[in-house]
Amino acid sequence: MFTDDSPIFQQLADRVAEDILNGTYPEDTGVPSTNEYASFYGISPITAAKGMNVLVEQGLLYKKRGIGMFVAPGAPAQLRSERRAAFRDQHVAPLLREAALLGIDPQELAQMINQKESS
Amino acid sequence: MTHALDIQQVTRSFGRTAAVDNVSFQVPENSIVGLLGRNGAGKTTLMSMLAGQDRPDTGTVTVLGDKVFERANTLSGISYVRDNQRYPDNYMLHHVLRIAPAFKPNWSRELADELVDGFRIPAKTKITKMSRGQLSSVAIVLSLASRAPITLLDEPYLGLDVTGRALFHRVLLDDYQTHPRTIVLSTHLIEESAALLDRVVIMDKGRIVVDDETENARDGAFVASGQTDAVGRLLVNHRILETHTVGALASVTAAGTLDDTLRQSARVAGVQLARASLQELVSAYGVNESTSETKEKVRA
């Protein structure tokens, strides 16, 4: 369920962040506990806790003692602005590189994007 | 913090062979540790000494802050079922389940029942007639239901079917969360158990070659693949652990950390880099340094 490319705790943090961004866990609602994630993914509870703490340190989750962890107000907006900043490098640049390799000119590329949008 | 297990300069020889050769390491309390390495690396010898069933020629073994050999107090806190555990000839499952609580103060009958049911262990078969997988199931029931502060699992998966292995993982994690304990697990099914392990101790020829948190250990090696000569040039200053070649292509596991400089050079050279999986790491450390002729190909 996890790949070998990066540490498991990082991959868990990324997945929970993804679920915060796409609205699975809205602001101020609880996310599954460390133990629930550990059991669900079959990973060590220490690893799961490390992953959740990444999000706490980034201010995306907050802890309520004895109750659990909750999505911080503003977390989706924070994630969205971080990911938008990285979008150009991570997604647009490779797209343009591949398009150039295949001889797809910017106009044709724009056309493809528009077609996809309207389909 | 005190260590649950503390091994200092332990050596244990059989005849002229040092099965465990001047080994030192500690295991923090309430962690899950993988004891990994090839057959004959010394894993079982080490576990026997941790369990007080054997003692070192030299060095000290401290468990839960106390000596272990012939110490009833310490031993009651340790669960160890050998991979070739023997049972009295006429014993069936119910005999074992009736006796176990007498030795294990934290014994959980509910947990034992759940596991017996899940593994479908036959009630009316003598243990001596059980299959390898059924024997492993009995061993897992004894190990986990004991809820011992120190749980030593030597090759718990032998012969176990895929459903049984998943059950073992699930129950181990669930019960560990409600009843934390220190678990040492030796196995060759590394990919399956990697995610469970907080720490790994990798042994080879009686010595410890890696002792670290799992993710840190994995940062200590990487796999480079591409044209053999390009890989060779890239890794000219690295310690090569294992090499596979096919035609003009090579895939090499090397010691070291993936940094930006190396990634940059690899991109230029057309070599792909990846973090080593735990399995690749263990495999690489088990390769004989002297007999790796393919290494020469990369070095040439």
Image (cartoon, rainbow, N blue to C red):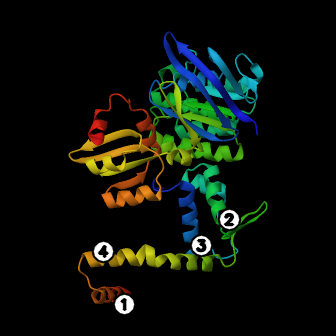
Q: Is A104 positioned to the left or the right of B183 in the image?
A: left
CA–CA distance in space, label 4 to label 2:
36 Å
Q: Is B22 positioned to the left or the right of A96 in the image?
A: right
CA–CA distance in space, label 3 to label 2:
15 Å
Q: Which comes sooner in the sequence, label 1 or label 2?
A: 2
The residue positioned 61% from the left and 80% from the top of the image is A77
Q: Quadrant of the C terminus of chain B?
A: top left
In the picture of the structure, the residue carrying the numbered disc 3 is A20
Q: Which comes sooner in the sequence, label 4 or label 3?
A: 3
The chain to which mark 3 is attached is: A
Q: Which comes sooner in the sequence, label 1 or label 4?
A: 4
In the picture of the structure, the residue carrying the numbered disc 4 is A98
- C-beta proximity under 8 Å, tags 1 and 2: no
Q: Quadrant of residue B169?
A: top right
CA–CA distance in space, label 3 to label 1:
27 Å
At label 2, the amino acid type is: Glu
In the picture of the structure, the residue carrying the numbered disc 1 is A118
Give percent across and percent down for residue B12: 57, 17
